[in-house]
């Protein structure tokens, strides 16, 4: 009889499953659940994007593209980045089209990390950075961010985390799950810490279009960070194209060349239909993105006000589409809070601990839902809190 346990790699065995999925799996077995759990836009992909994809299929444009992606798309990404950030990237060898931002993150880490290299990861943050680092043989160096610092990486915390083995810093802003945004001034201070080092920066900017009150600043806009930054972005969040699975990486030519080499063997190329649709997204959908951001802003204000009125302190998120209220006052752990809320009032949230130990004492609530949906969820959470107090 096969001993499958012994055949699975030690790294694969030791990596914990995503803490996000457990509560979704429970919720899927229950009727009448109100979820604030999914980080997926509830808007349809704009029609002109869908139409461009349909036209490409009608024209039988269904063959492999170049490994790096359609040149027209890479040119459009380059123009878009210059328009949004004022940065120039050569579409021939400084732009790579990937299968979602997730593949771009994975290939970047694999391309630069050797066994034993350290990767600095601020937490709470998206769940993939730690396991991807481990799969590459790297060592995650976790830096816990604090609510009193707005869940942002501070220069002092970064400096304390750097060692001789540090190879890469992940800057996951705007942040999932906290909604934190790094300002130009704050990024400048990070750049000063890194100025005389040989440390690269992986800047995950998938939520770059979803900021409130100020435009997004990329680390690559900072002089001391430009030459060391690999920008990761994609179409899922801003253009409501999650299922199209399309992202991209921008950065120094030698780094993009190495990432592309791994991408050739692992993936071949990103989906052709999605690439044709993405060209249209970058060319003509600024107004659609603005409309979605305005709606998210209204939802953001509602959910933050709602949590605060319920007695759950909630730092104002300035980007992405998540609120990260504190539930410490309840005396429950993040998992206990979410599990009891789910069974008591059929509201699904994500425990903050799913995003690292620094997330304990918080829960993530997505506002990718209608105002009516959010109001009902808040009402039920209020009932649950009254139950806890009685």
Image: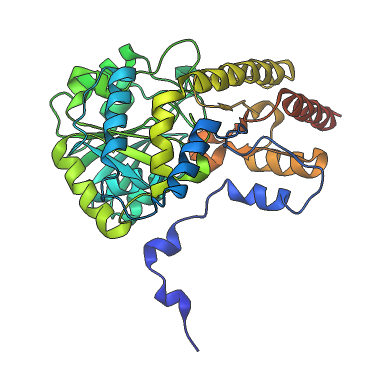
Q: Measured along the vertical axis of the image, is residue 129 above or below residue 10? A: above
The x, y position of residue 355, in whole percent, is 50, 39
- Which quadrant holds residue 196? top left
The x, y position of residue 373, in whole percent, is 74, 29
Visible residue check, residue 151: no
Task: Using residue 31 as the reference point, say whether residue 3 is left or right of it.
Answer: left
Is 52 in front, or is 332?
Answer: 52
Q: Quadrant of the C terminus?
A: top right
Please tell me which residue is depicted at 60% across the width and 50% down the height of the picture. Answer: 21
Is 285 in front, or is 213?
Answer: 285
- Which quadrant holds residue 167? top left
The x, y position of residue 95, in whole percent, is 25, 37
Visible residue check, residue 211: yes
Task: Using residue 323 as the reference point, say whether residue 71 is left or right of it.
Answer: left
Q: Measured along the vertical axis of the image, is residue 73 above or below residue 155? A: below
Please tell me which residue is depicted at 48% across the width and 23% down the height of the picture. Answer: 210
| Extreme residue toward the right, this view | 390
Please tell me which residue is depicted at 69% across the width and 40% down the height of the picture. Answer: 338
């Amino acid at each position: 009889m096969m001993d499958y346990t012994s055949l699975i790699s030690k790294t694969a065995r030791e990596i914990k499953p995503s803490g996000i999925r457990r509560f979704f799996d429970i919720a899927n077995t229950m009727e009448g659940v109100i979820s604030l759990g999914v980080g997926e836009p509830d808007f349809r992909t704009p029609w002109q994007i869908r139409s461009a994809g349909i036209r490409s299929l009608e024209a039988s444009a269904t063959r492999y593209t170049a490994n790096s992606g359609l040149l027209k798309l890479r040119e459009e990404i380059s123009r878009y980045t210059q328009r949004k950030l004022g940065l120039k990237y050569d579409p021939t060898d400084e732009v790579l089209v990937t299968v979602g931002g997730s593949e771009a993150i994975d290939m970047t880490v694999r391309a630069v990390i050797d066994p034993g290299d350290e990767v600095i990861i601020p937490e709470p943050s998206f769940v993939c950075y730690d396991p991807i680092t481990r799969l590459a043989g790297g060592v995650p160096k976790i830096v816990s961010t604090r609510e009193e610092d707005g869940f942002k990486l501070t220069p002092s915390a970064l400096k304390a985390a750097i060692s001789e083995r540090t190879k890469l810093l992940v800057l996951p802003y705007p942040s999932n799950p906290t909604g934190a945004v790094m300002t130009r001034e704050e990024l400048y201070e990070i750049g000063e810490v890194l100025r005389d080092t040989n440390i690269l920066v992986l800047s995950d900017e998938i939520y770059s279009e979803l900021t409130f009150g100020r435009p997004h600043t990329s680390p690559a806009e900072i002089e001391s960070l430009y030459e060391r930054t690999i920008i990761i972005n994609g179409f899922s969040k801003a253009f409501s194209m999650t299922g199209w699975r399309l992202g991209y990486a921008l950065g120094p030519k030698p780094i993009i060349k190495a990432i592309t080499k791994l991408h050739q063997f692992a993936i071949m190329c990103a989906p052709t239909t999605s690439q044709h649709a993405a060209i249209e997204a970058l060319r003509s959908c600024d107004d659609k993105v603005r409309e979605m951001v305005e709606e998210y802003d209204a939802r953001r204000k509602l959910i933050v006000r709602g949590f605060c009125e319920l007695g759950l302190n909630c730092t104002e998120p300035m980007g992405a589409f998540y609120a990260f209220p504190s539930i410490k006052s309840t005396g429950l752990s993040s998992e206990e809070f979410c599990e009891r809320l789910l069974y008591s009032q059929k509201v699904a949230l994500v425990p903050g601990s799913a995003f690292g130990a620094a997330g304990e004492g918080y829960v993530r609530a997505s506002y990718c839902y209608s105002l009516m949906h959010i109001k009902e969820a808040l009402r039920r959470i209020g009932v649950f809190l009254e139950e806890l107090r009685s």
